[in-house]
Image (cartoon, rainbow, N blue to C red):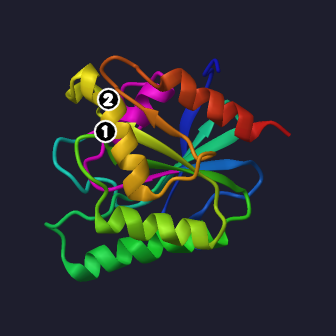
């Protein structure tokens, strides 16, 4: 997809702040420091559309990015960061859940997981929740450049097993350094947006 326009359309912590539900949305979710902001910037060929930080937990709001005036990418707050209070963590969870449960224009959730680590309890909990509400999921294994090429297939297989992926559920290895997985992710987005 050629990105002609990518801009922040809204920053929200509650439903009343969401943009009008007049175009399809694809949400991106993942634990803190999984590389979500870097991935989003690479997808849309912008260096600083989504704010990137070396310290986890920077995205504390739901950020809506309008792409080419035809759909939105929704950046959900990261979860599982230990250095925030339990009340703050619960607030983020409620914010994300409120969006995921109540947004009719949501087409799919892209769940990001760090390929170097086994899925954690928060990853599994979100996955079960999404499945319970029949929300379509695409899995992206980030930071694929951080492991040896010879380990890639084994790690993907282990992650698929740990998450109990069905044969028709996709896991895309992704690297912001080498751009591996970028085209596959855009193919999925394009298919999702087809009428």
| Rendered-image quadrant of the N terminus | top right
Please indicate whether residue 38 sits to the left or right of residue 18 in the image. left
Q: Which residue, given by chain and number where applicable, does mark 2 sit on? A: 152
Q: Residue at x 70, y 31 (%)?
A: 190
Identify the disc placed on residue 163. none
Inspect the magenta stretch and tell me whether residue 46 lies in it: yes
Q: Could you say which disc has been placed on residue 155 in the image?
A: 1
Check if residue 33 falls in the magenta segment.
Answer: yes
Is residue 187 depicted above or below 32 in this figure? above
Q: Residue at x 40, y 30 (%)?
A: 174
Nearest the eye: 99 or 125: 125
The picture quadrant where one finds residue 178 is top left
Residue 180 found in image quarter: top left
- The residue closer to the viewer here, 141 or 60, is 141
Circle 2 SS class:
helix
Q: Which residues are magenta?
A: 28-52
Q: Position of residue 112 (x, y in %)?
A: 41, 47
58 with respect to 17 (left or right): left
Task: Give me the C-alpha separation between circle 2 and circle 1.
Answer: 5 Å
Is residue 43 in view from this perspective?
yes
Residue 14 makes an appearance in the image = no
């Amino acid at each position: 997809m050629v990105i002609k326009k990518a801009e922040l359309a809204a920053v929200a912590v509650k439903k009343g702040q969401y943009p009008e539900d007049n175009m399809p949305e694809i949400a991106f979710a993942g634990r803190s420091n999984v590389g979500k902001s870097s991935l989003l910037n690479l997808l849309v060929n912008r260096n600083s559309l989504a704010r990137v930080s070396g310290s986890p937990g920077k995205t504390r709001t739901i950020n809506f990015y309008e792409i080419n005036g035809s759909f939105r990418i929704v950046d959900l707050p990261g979860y599982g960061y230990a250095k925030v209070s339990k009340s703050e963590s619960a607030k983020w969870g409620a914010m994300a859940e409120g969006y995921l449960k109540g947004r009719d224009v949501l087409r799919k959730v892209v769940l990001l997981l760090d390929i170097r680590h086994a899925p954690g309890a928060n990853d599994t909990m979100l996955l079960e929740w999404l499945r319970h509400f029949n929300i379509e999921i695409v899995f992206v294994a980030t930071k694929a450049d951080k492991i040896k090429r010879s380990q890639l297939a084994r790690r993907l297989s282990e992650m698929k097993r740990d998450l109990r992926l069905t044969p028709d559920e996709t896991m895309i290895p992704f690297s912001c350094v080498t751009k591996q997985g970028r085209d596959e992710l855009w193919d999925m987005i394009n298919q999702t947006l087809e009428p």
